[in-house]
Structure formats: C-alpha cells, structure tokens
C-alpha cells in the first residue's frame, strides 16, 4: 500500500515538473518572440533613420548645387555688368576727351574776326550751279570751278548731286545772279576719296556762248585749305544755290528742258561743333543756313591769316523736325 502511494506521489511530481517545464518553455518562447519583434522593430527603425538620412543628404546636395548655380549666375551677371561698366567708362572717357578738345578749341578761337563782302567778292562767282536730269526728274545742286592736275577745268561737288544722273550741265552766273555760261559735264565721275560724298566732273562743250571755260572764275583753286581742326566759333560762310532761293522765272537748258532759276546765296555763321563719326578728320556742324541745293558748294572760313577753304557743305535731315548743315572737311575731300 505504501509502495502504491509512493509511486502515485512520484508521478504527480513528474507531472508537476513537466507542467513547470512547459510553463518555463512557454515563457521563454513568448519572451524570445517579443525579443525577436523588438529586434525586428529596431532594425526597421534603423533602416528608416538611414533612409531619412540619405534623403536629407540628397536634398542637401541638391540645395548645395542650387546655391552653386545661383552663385555662378551672380558671377556671370557681375562679369556682364563689369564689361558694360567698362564699355560705358570708355565711352564716357571718349566723350570727355571730345568735350575737352572742344573747350580747348573754343579757348583758342579767333576773336573779332568777320568775313566781309570785300573778302568774298573775288570768289563768289566761282561757285556754280549743277543741274542734272534723272529720268523725268530734274535736280539742282552746287559746285565750285576747280583746276586739278589730273582734271583741269572741272567742277567739285557732292557725289549725291550727280549720282545716277542721265545728264548734268553747269550754269555759271555773275555777281548779279544773271546766267553768263552753260556747259555740259562729262558723265565720268572722278573722286579723290570714295569713302565720302565727293565727286569731280570734267567740264566739256558749251551749251551757249563762246567764252572758253578757262576764262571763268577758278580762283577758289588757289585759296589755302583751313587747318585740319578749326575752333568752335570760327566765322563761316556757305555759298551755293539753295532751294529756298528758287525764282518764278525759268530758263531753257537744251536737252535738259525748262528749269526754274535759282539764285546764288551767301549765308553766314560759325563752326558750332564737330562730327567725329566718319574716318579721317572731323567734319563740322555750322550755324550758317544750309538747305537742299547747297550741297556741293563751298564753305569758307576765316582765321588770323585770312580766308581758307573749310569744306563741302552737305544738306542733311536730322531729328524729327530739324535740318542740319554738315560741312565735310576739306582735308578729307582733297588729296
């Protein structure tokens, strides 16, 4: 009996032990699972942290690239502005130099020098009228009688006066504006400076009268040239046949046809400025009136040494409402 009780007790102990072991194993398994989940969550968190850090690095790299690009753009803009500033500075220096030269010229301008009618009387009839026909159109300009070594008995004028003309003739008037000679002009155009508006034409056969062309007034050929730069304020006269001097009377010019008489006029003023836009010596702006038809005549100035040839007056349209007389420097016109 005692043996049977002992075996029963032992079995209970074994059962209890197994239950305890199962409980322990169950606890260990649950704890292991929780540990596993914790480790897994930790790894996931670390992955998320690493991914976030990588995204932040990429974002920072892109931001850095944008900053670098902005700095490059700013540098390019600064270089452009520097180049523009340098260009403006050079332009300003050039303008200041021109102003300085003008002021120096004004300071050295001759005082109380005038051009009188007695000064001009030997030369006015040497300025002549050039009349050209172009199709059905007749145009008029001015010129001067000139003796060149290469082209004796010639007329000096603006190229645009004779450009494209079918035929041109020369009208010579006396001091009373009465015509005293009509001559044909050679169709060949000579030029001493093709870069400016200048032309030389040979005078050929007379249209009326028997007086040889050599007997007319070529005295302007002997007048000295003015200095290359005449001071602002220098007295100037413009001699020519402007459109405003057209009369109602007419004259017949053979193959040219009937044209209105235009009187030779003299207008006076001063050198008022310089045009340095073209190559060569500076041309002149003058206050003396220059109209269409004056082109190709002669601008005469005066300095302490006396009269001198300033250049060819040329009529221009400038601005919205004004016309401006430009005198092409004689040093650019003649060799």
Image (tube, helix red, strand yellow):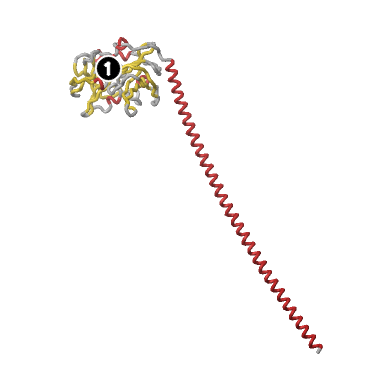
List x then y, in percent, for residue 255: 18, 24
Q: Nearer the viewer, residue 33 or 51?
A: 33
Residue 296 drawn at (x, y percent) = 30, 21
**Residue closest to the eye, 152 or 322:** 322
Disc 1 crowd rating (10 Å Cα; few below 14, some 14-19, many 20+) is some
Q: Is residue 56 visible?
A: yes
Figure quadrant of residue 186: top left
Q: Is residue 335 visible?
A: no
Residue depicted at x 42% and y 17%: 106
Query: Is residue 326 left or right of 61 when viewed as pictured?
Result: left
SS state under label 1: strand
Quadrant containing the C terminus is top left
Which residue does the numbered mark 1 point to in the structure image? 265
Rendering quarter of residue 230: top left
So how many labels did they put on this image? 1
Quadrant housing residue 217: top left
Q: Residue furthest bottom?
A: 1
Location of the N terminus by quadrant is bottom right
Locate residue 265 relative to residue 109 in the image: left or right: left
58 displayed left or right of 208: right
Q: In the rendered image of this protein, does residue 137 appear above or below residue 214?
A: below
The vertical placement of 273 against 14, above or below, is above
Relative depth, front residue between 326 and 28: 28
- For the point 33% across and 29% down, which residue is it? 320
Give how far across and how far down residue 304 sits, in percent.
Answer: 39, 11
């Amino acid at each position: 009996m005692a043996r049977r009780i002992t075996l029963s007790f032992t079995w209970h102990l074994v059962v209890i032990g197994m239950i305890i072991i199962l409980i322990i194993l169950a606890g260990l398994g649950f704890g292991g699972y929780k540990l596993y989940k914790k480790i897994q969550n930790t790894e996931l968190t670390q992955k998320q942290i690493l991914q976030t850090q990588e995204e932040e690095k990429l974002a920072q790299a892109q931001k850095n690239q944008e900053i670098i690009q902005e700095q490059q753009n700013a540098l390019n803009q600064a270089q452009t502005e520097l180049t523009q500033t340098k260009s403006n500075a050079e332009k300003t220096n050039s303008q200041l130099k021109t102003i300085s030269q003008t002021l120096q010229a004004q300071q050295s301008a001759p005082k109380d020098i005038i051009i009188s009618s007695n000064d001009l009387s030997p030369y006015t009839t040497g300025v002549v009228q050039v009349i050209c026909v172009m199709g059905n159109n007749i145009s008029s300009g001015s010129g001067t009688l000139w003796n060149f070594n290469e082209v004796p008995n010639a007329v000096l004028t603006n190229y645009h006066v004779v450009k494209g003309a079918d035929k041109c003739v020369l009208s010579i008037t006396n001091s009373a504006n009465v015509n005293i000679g009509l001559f044909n002009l050679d169709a060949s155009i000579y030029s001493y400076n093709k870069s400016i508006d200048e032309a030389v034409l040979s005078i050929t056969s007379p249209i009326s009268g028997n007086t040889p062309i050599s007997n007319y007034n070529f005295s302007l050929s002997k007048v000295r040239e003015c200095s290359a730069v005449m001071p602002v304020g220098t007295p100037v006269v413009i001699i020519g046949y402007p459109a405003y001097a057209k009369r109602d009377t007419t004259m017949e010019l053979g193959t040219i046809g009937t044209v209105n008489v235009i009187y030779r006029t003299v207008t006076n003023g001063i050198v008022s400025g310089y045009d340095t836009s073209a190559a060569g010596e500076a041309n002149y702006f003058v206050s003396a009136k220059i109209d269409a038809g004056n082109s190709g005549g002669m601008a005469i100035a005066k300095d302490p040494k006396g009269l001198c040839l300033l250049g060819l007056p040329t009529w221009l349209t400038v601005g919205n409402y004004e016309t401006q007389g430009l005198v092409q420097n004689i040093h650019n016109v003649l060799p």
